[in-house]
Amino acid sequence: MIRVLVDTSAVIALANPSDIAHKRAARTLLRLQAERAVLITTSYVLHETYSLLGRRHGLQAVRSFRQEIAPLLSVQWVDPCLHEAGLDYLLSRPQRRLSLTDAVSILAATEERVDEVFAFDQHFRQAGLPLSE
C-alpha cells in the first residue's frame, strides 16, 4: 500500500473544474483510490485549503471539500516541534519562495515516509520528493 502526502495545490485543482490541472488531478485521485493509497496531509494544508477555497470559490466549495475530500485524508496535526522545524527549514532556504505550509509538509512527508506527493507545487520535487503522475 502506498503512502501519499496530499498538498493544497492538488485539492484546489480538484475543486475547480476550470483549473488547468483539474483533469490531471482527477485522474490521479482515481488512481490513488484504485490503489487504496493512504492519503496523508497536515493540519496546515487543511487550513490553507479551507482559506483558499473560501476566498476563491465560496463557502460551498469549503463544504464540498469538508464532506467529500477531507474524510479521505489522514491528518497529521502540526505540533510545536513540527512547526518550529518547518520554520527552521523555511528560513534555511531564503532563495526559494517557500511557504511555511509547504516547509512543514516537506518535513511531514519525510517523517511519514511517503512514497509520493500529490501536488502541483514544484517545491516538493526540489526537496527530492517524487510527485504523483
Image: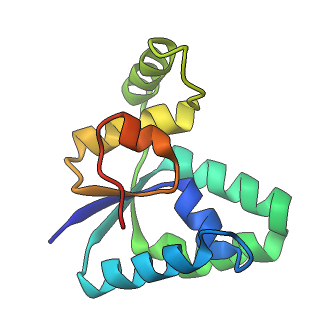
Compared to 132, does 76 lie above or below?
above
Residue at image coords 66%, 69%: 20
Residue at image coords 54%, 44%: 44
Q: What quarter of the picture does the C terminus occupy?
A: bottom left
Q: Is residue 123 left or right of residue 129?
A: right
Compared to 88, does 60 lie above or below?
below
Q: How is the image coloured?
A: rainbow
Where residue 91 appears, x then y in whole percent?
50, 13
Front residue of this view, candidates 26 and 103: 26
Compared to 131, does 112 lie above or below?
above
Q: What quarter of the picture does the N terminus occupy?
A: bottom left
Q: Is residue 20 left or right of residue 74?
A: right
Q: Quadrant of residue 95?
A: top right
Where residue 109 appears, x then y in whole percent?
31, 44
Q: Is residue 9 left or right of residue 18?
A: left
Compared to 63, does 3 lie above or below?
above
State whether residue 72 appears in this view: yes
Where residue 67 appears, x then y in whole percent?
59, 80
Front residue of this view, candidates 18 and 81: 18
Residue at image coords 23%, 47%: 112
Q: Quadrant of residue 30?
A: bottom left
Residue at image coords 64%, 48%: 48
Q: How many marks?
A: 0
State whether residue 78 appears in this view: no
Extreme residue toward the left, this view: 1
Q: Is residue 69 left or right of residue 37?
A: right
Where residue 69 appears, x then y in whole percent?
52, 75
